[in-house]
Each structure stands twice: as structure tokens, then as C-alpha cells.
Image (cartoon, rainbow, N blue to C red):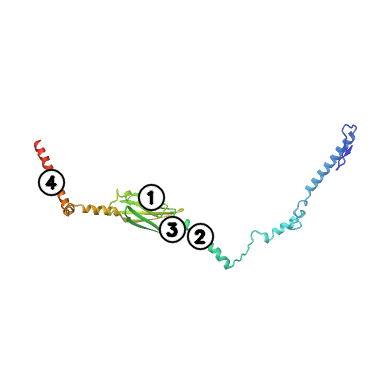
Amino acid sequence: MSNTTNYNLTKPNEGSSGWANDLNSNFDTIDNVIKANETAVQSHLISNSAHNASSIKSNTIADNVQEALNILNSNKANANHTHNIYITSSELEPMQTEINTIKNTLDQLSPDLDLVELSASISNKAGGISVSINTTPYVHLTACRVMIAFNGSYIYDSVNSSSFVFVPENAINHIVNHNDNIQIKVIIYSGYSMKERTYTHQFKHIYSDFEIKVNSYMQTLTISAIVNAFAQDVDALQSLANVLHSSNTLAQKIALIQGGNQ
């Protein structure tokens, strides 16, 4: 038979008998230990000072928690205190430069268009109308819109990401004629900001180089010019006379046939 280490409780050997008294003694010992612990815990909880901050030790800021709380509650830990930061002009100048750079970048990416001047250069070109949109100062535009009205009705509307817009002539010439006045509205967008301006423009058809050459050739193709050209060559002039004679002969035969049928 052996005993436990802490409370010396009896541990009977396997198969042994007559150890009822030892077992009862073990229960009495366990009961007394449990009761003693219960009493100690209740006494500790009832004590008013057992858990006070001054009774709890601290090995960092102060000897106990109460002193540590007092330090943290002093002016050095007060949330309402202020700090004075001293920056020299040599340190401030690079910081201000960086701030200005960031501000300028943001102003260009998403500017307030109320502070920007809008202008447009409009000119007639071969094949259509050229509209070049400008802002002062230059800013990044999200989109540009060009609308054309004639006699109070809009006949063209285009939205582009570019500040240069070309209006094809065939998109408006079914309504607008040469020298007609039209209204061109230019609208710019940047972020949630927008601005618009309307111009009165006189539409003119501008001939392309090809059209000019064709018109020039057509003006030279006259009867007089053809005869003069043949007159420079005897053979050519004789050929022209033969063609004219044949035509007259054929005309006479057709007249005879028509007269015989009547």
C-alpha cells in the first residue's frame, strides 16, 4: 500500500481487502481541503482592498497599477495636450513644392471648369468643318461634345475624347447649303464639371484639289476648244470632216425612211 504525494491519501493495492477505514479517511481529507479552499476564495472576494489598483503590482511603469494610472493620467498622457513642431524654412520649402505639384496635378485631372476659359477655332475645310477646342489654362478634359443647329433644330451631335473634332460635310449638306449660317455648340466635360459655348458660323463648301482639277478640265472641253485642237492637225481635221459628213448622210437616210413610212 502506498500514499499520494500532496495530501498523503491511501492508495490500496490491487486485490487487497479491509481498507474501508483508509478510504473513509481519504474522503475526510478531501472534504476538509475543498472546504478550506472555498473559505479562502470567499474571504478573498469579500475583501474590499484585494483588487484595488494599489494592491496590484506592476514591474514596468511603477510599483503598482495605481501609480501607473496616475502617471498616464498626468499632462504627459492627456489627450488635450499639444506639441510644438519646429520646421526650418529649408525643410519647409521642399515640402511646399511637393504639395503644390500634387495640387496642380489634381487640378488638371479634375478641374473646376468654372475657372477655365473655353474657346474654339472653327474653319471650313475640304470635306467638312474643323473644330479645335482650347482651354485657358490647359486642363485635362474627360470628353468634348459638338452639336450643330440649323434654323433652331439640331442636325448633328458628336461626343469625342479628343479636343479636335471634324464634322463631315455629308453629315449636314443634305440640310445646309453653301453660305448658310449655322450654330455650333461646344461642350467640355471634366469629372463632374462642364462648360459650354455657342458660335455662329457660315458654312462654305471648300473644293478639294481633285474637284478643282475636274472643273478645270470641264471648262476646257468646249466645241470651240475641240475644233481649235483639230485645226492644228490636217489629218485630224479631215477625220472630223468625215465623221460630220457620215453623220449628215445618216441623218438624211433616216429622214427619207421616216418620210416613206408616212
Query: Could you give the CA–CA distance between mark 4 and mark 1, rounded to whole angstroms?
Result: 62 Å
Q: Earlier in the sequence, mark 4 or mark 1?
A: 1
Q: Which residue type carries mark 4?
A: His
The quarter of the displayed image where residue 91 is located: bottom right
- Residue at 11 percent across and 40 percent down: it is 253
Helix, strand or loop at mark 3: helix
| Tag 1 residue | 158
Few, some or many C-alpha atoms within 10 Å of disc 1 (few <14, some 14-19, many ≥20)?
Answer: few
Q: Earlier in the sequence, mark 4 or mark 3?
A: 3
Query: Could you give the CA–CA distance between mark 2 and mark 1, rounded to whole angstroms?
Result: 32 Å
Q: Nearer the viewer, residue 142 or 114?
A: 142
| Tag 3 residue | 114
- Residue at 38 percent across and 50 percent down: it is 158
Between label 4 and label 1, give the one nearer the viewer: 4
Q: Earlier in the sequence, mark 2 or mark 3?
A: 2
Report whether 62 appears left or right of 105.
right
Q: Is residue 26 above or below residue 210?
A: above
| Tag 2 residue | 103
Q: Position of residue 117 (x, y in %)?
A: 41, 60
Few, some or many C-alpha atoms within 10 Å of disc 4 (few <14, some 14-19, many ≥20)?
Answer: few
Query: Could you give the CA–CA distance between mark 4 and mark 3, rounded to whole angstroms?
Result: 81 Å
Q: Which residue type carries mark 1?
A: Ser
Q: Which residue type carries mark 2?
A: Lys
Q: Position of residue 18 (x, y in %)?
A: 90, 32
